[in-house]
Image (tube, rainbow, N blue to C red):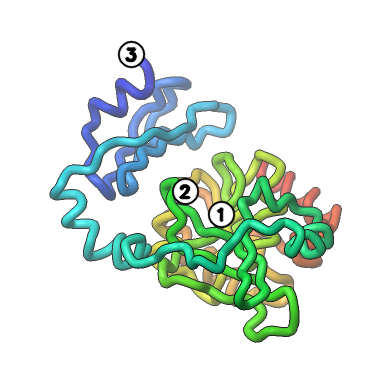
């Protein structure tokens, strides 16, 4: 029996997580499966095991009714729609992307014609549920959240989430295909952040060097939701690609 057959037999309802013996490495209680709004995500926490993946399932009507009071309120997927003034215009955002050496096409970046901002889409279950824009001029605020989802901006793939403060850092961290860069876009972790991060086996907190109290609070909060939580003490923002910081990240992530 393959992993998908085993997971299908669990019949998980929305929001349910089960821990069990890994079907790949046979290690006891290291394999978790979670149903998050129809996304079935599984991971083995044993470092040497490759069991990790996800699939989609159909939510029952009851699941949907139950989720409307929490997840729908959190994500506002029903009320957020991409504004008409969000367009694809790589020429307008090219200087910003060149400065940070990020690929606008790979990241799906958009341009806010009205406010002259580069727009980072917030995607949940392959649907754009929110967006955050960074001013390309002197407009205040520098960063603007367009919706009310309280979900993080995320980019990358892997079992390890690297929690950062801004979208550029998240995009750079996630670009290597080893980590998922997760930008919290705020001063605290919402229930949406915690629910999103609970799918990962490890979360590494990598906030600004001057944000130690917030870093410690994030670590305390996440230890209730993620099996392994680590702190990366930075010399600079990860978006500046300091070699020492990335070497330390690699060491922590091993």
Label 2 packing within 10 angstroms: few (<14), some (14-19), many (20+): some
- Of badges 2 and 3, nearer the viewer stands 3
Between disc 1 and disc 2, whose residue precedes?
1
Q: Is residue 142 visible?
A: yes
Mark 2 lies on a secondary structure that is loop
Between disc 2 and disc 3, whose residue precedes?
3
Give the label on residue 227, or none: 2
Q: Which residue is mark 3?
A: 1
Alpha carbon of mark 1 to alpha carbon of mark 2: how far? Answer: 20 Å
Q: Which residue is mark 1?
A: 154
Alpha carbon of mark 2 to alpha carbon of mark 3: how far? Answer: 27 Å
Front one among 87 and 43: 87
In the image: residue 80, left or right of residue 48: left
Label 3 packing within 10 angstroms: few (<14), some (14-19), many (20+): few
Front one among 8 and 18: 8
Front one among 221 and 9: 9
In the image: residue 143, left or right of residue 6: right
Q: Is residue 230 visible?
A: no
In the image: residue 91, left or right of residue 33: right
Q: Position of residue 240 (x, y in %)?
A: 81, 62
Mark 3 lies on a secondary structure that is loop
């Amino acid at each position: 029996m393959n992993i998908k057959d085993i997971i299908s037999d669990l019949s998980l309802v929305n929001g349910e997580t089960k821990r069990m013996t890994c079907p790949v490495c046979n290690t006891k209680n290291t394999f978790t499966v979670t149903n998050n709004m129809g996304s079935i995500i599984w991971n083995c926490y044993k470092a040497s095991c490759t069991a990790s993946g996800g699939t989609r399932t159909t939510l029952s009507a009851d699941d949907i009714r139950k989720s409307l009071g929490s997840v729908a309120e959190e994500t506002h997927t029903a009320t957020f729609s991409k504004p008409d003034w969000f367009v694809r215009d790589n020429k307008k955002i090219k200087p910003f992307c060149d400065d940070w050496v990020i690929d606008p096409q790979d990241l799906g970046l958009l341009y806010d014609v009205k406010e002259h901002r580069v727009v980072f889409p917030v995607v949940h279950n392959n649907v754009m549920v929110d967006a955050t824009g960074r001013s390309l001029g002197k407009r205040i605020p520098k960063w603007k959240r367009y919706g009310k989802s309280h979900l993080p901006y995320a980019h990358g793939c892997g079992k390890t989430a690297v929690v950062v403060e801004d979208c550029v850092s998240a995009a750079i961290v996630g670009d290597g295909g080893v980590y998922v860069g997760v930008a919290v876009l705020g001063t605290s972790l919402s229930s949406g952040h915690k629910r999103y991060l609970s799918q990962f086996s490890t979360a590494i907190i990598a906030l600004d060097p001057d944000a130690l109290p917030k870093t410690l609070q994030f670590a305390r909060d996440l230890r209730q939701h993620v099996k392994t939580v680590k702190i990366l003490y930075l010399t600079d923002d990860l978006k500046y690609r300091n070699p020492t910081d990335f070497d330390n990240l690699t060491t922590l992530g091993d």
